[in-house]
Amino acid sequence: MILLDRQSLRFRRVVKALALFILGAALAGAAELPFGGWLQIPILALVWLTLSKSVSQSIKKNFVAGIAFGLGYFVTGLWWIYISLHDVGGMNAPLSCTAIFLLSVCMSFYFSAACQSIFLFKHPHLKGLLLAAAWVAMEYLRGSLFTGFPWIGLAEAQFNGPFAPIAAYFGGLSCTFLVVWSSWELTQIKTKPYLSSLYILGMIGVCQLASLWTFTKPIGEPLSVRLIQGNFAQSLKFNPRAIQDQMRYYASEITAKSADLIVIPETALPWPQSNLPVGLVAYLQDFANTHSSNILLGLIGEVETSKGIQYTNRATGLSPDFPMYQYDKAHLVPFGEFIPLGFRWFVNAFHVPLSDFAHGSLDQAPYSIQRRGQEPINAAITICYEDVFGDELAGRIRNSDPPANLLINMTNLAWFGDSQAPTQQLRLSQLRSLETGLPSLRATNTGITAVLGPNGTLQTQLPKFTQATLQTQVQAYSGKTPYVIWGNIPILSVSCILLLFGFIRQRRFW
């Protein structure tokens, strides 16, 4: 009889873990749908209900249940890393799958740690707030520890959800707080239908009203812009002839027509700046001078470090009769662009083809776009992965002199093929525009090349996997949102105070 009970208990745990894995996968998949931010709330509510029906009081077993939920979420949301490791990087399939699985496990630890609030705190009226506070704390740590990897958080899906307008005030983490809190309140509707419904609808109403206030305003005449999408396969990166063709294409397309601003993608000129074809940069600079155009080039830079000469992922700006601008990517991708301390043995042992770039500083000046007879427009540059770090970007804008009027992201997502990676990063850029109140330009190799308004709305874009140029105009803005001024301090302070209060109250009942 005891043996049957144990087997039944083990079976229930397996079923629960499987259900949580499926719900995690559904949560990640919902983000890709038109109203994904709305859909994620009831899915999370189902997660809380499943976790609450604990078959064990063991912290270890409950933590494992949370890991199952996180695994479903991250494996579904990050599977496209396999394309860069296996299809492009040449890593064998088992090792590539293992790398994605281990990354998903690491990310799941943060999710599961936050989920333990359900078991730790007992008061039903406070549990939702404490769960939301714990989730914010874990998401902050996920974006900070070990260089951070906050990709596919709940916040960016809220651009298509009810809580997006609050991002301009308190950032993406505030959206995360409200998603988790409202999903918990949804689980309480059965026991307190009127109060929980009033809480949820009232908060949605407050957030929608918050969108009526704006903190930035148009400045100067609109910029004429050309964003060039080359659509070059990443598999050609080791082919010298293909690289030459790629550089000829971009040089030809840049000089085909003048514009106030011409932008090509990240590493579109995939050689070190000192090894580019003789006269290429001088030729483009002459075009900028004679046609009053500002040109932003993605290439490989070189800097002197304690290790000697190291490469950087660089944006080089050419402006009419103005000194050359350089921005070196500050927040590099672990294992993709640099090898973390202590992992050199792994790279050497498995012959993994990884780069080891130097970091740029976090206080680099914006790119000054020069226009005759008008004040310059200053653009805050991010390269690819950097636009996932909203607090870093807000800090750069907050401390920048002169102030930023525009965001520019240069990206090469050919590494990830035909996956959801481009749409995930587009939502990140939309959230960054919403947080800062500034329009955004996205110049990408394979897509999504686009122009976003100051509230993150998609104004125009090129189809993915096409070789084309997006020619349009963009209005620059001036001013700072509350989030740019305060950063994450308000939402982190509220979360820490809630958690402290929760622990103190909990101890009174122990």
Image (spheres, rainbow, N blue to C red):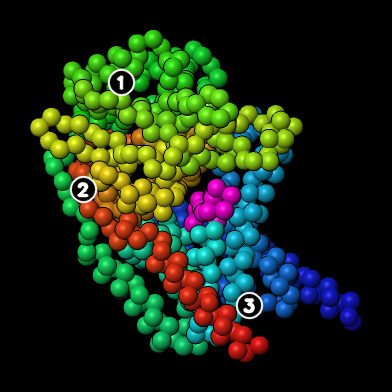
The numbered mark, 1 or 3, whose residue comes first in the sequence reads 3
From the top left corner, tell me how far across and down residue 187 is, in percent. 51, 78
Choose between 263 and 26: the one closer to the eye.
Answer: 263
Disc 1 or 2, which lies upstream in sequence? 1
**Distance from the alpha carbon under mark 1 to that under mark 2:** 28 Å
Q: Could you tell me residue 174's position as x and y percent? A: 41, 65
Q: Which mark is residue 253?
A: 1
Q: Is residue 87 one of those drawn in magenta? A: no
Q: Nearer the viewer, residue 402 or 194?
A: 402
Q: Which residue is mark 2?
A: 477
Q: Which residue is mark 3?
A: 119
Magenta stretch bounds: 142-153
Circle 3 sits in a helix, a strand or a loop, which is it?
helix
Q: Which mark is residue 146?
A: none
The answer to whether any part of residue 33 appears in the image is: no
- Distance from disc 1 to disc 3, alpha carbons, whole Å, reads 59 Å
Q: Residue furthest front?
A: 306
Considering the whole magenta stretch, tell me its main secondary structure: loop
Label 1 residue SS:
helix
Residue plotted at (35% across, 75% down): 203
First reached walking from the N terminus: tag 2 or tag 3: 3
> Of the residues tagged 2 and 3, which is closer to the observer?
2
The amino acid beneath tag 1 is: Glu
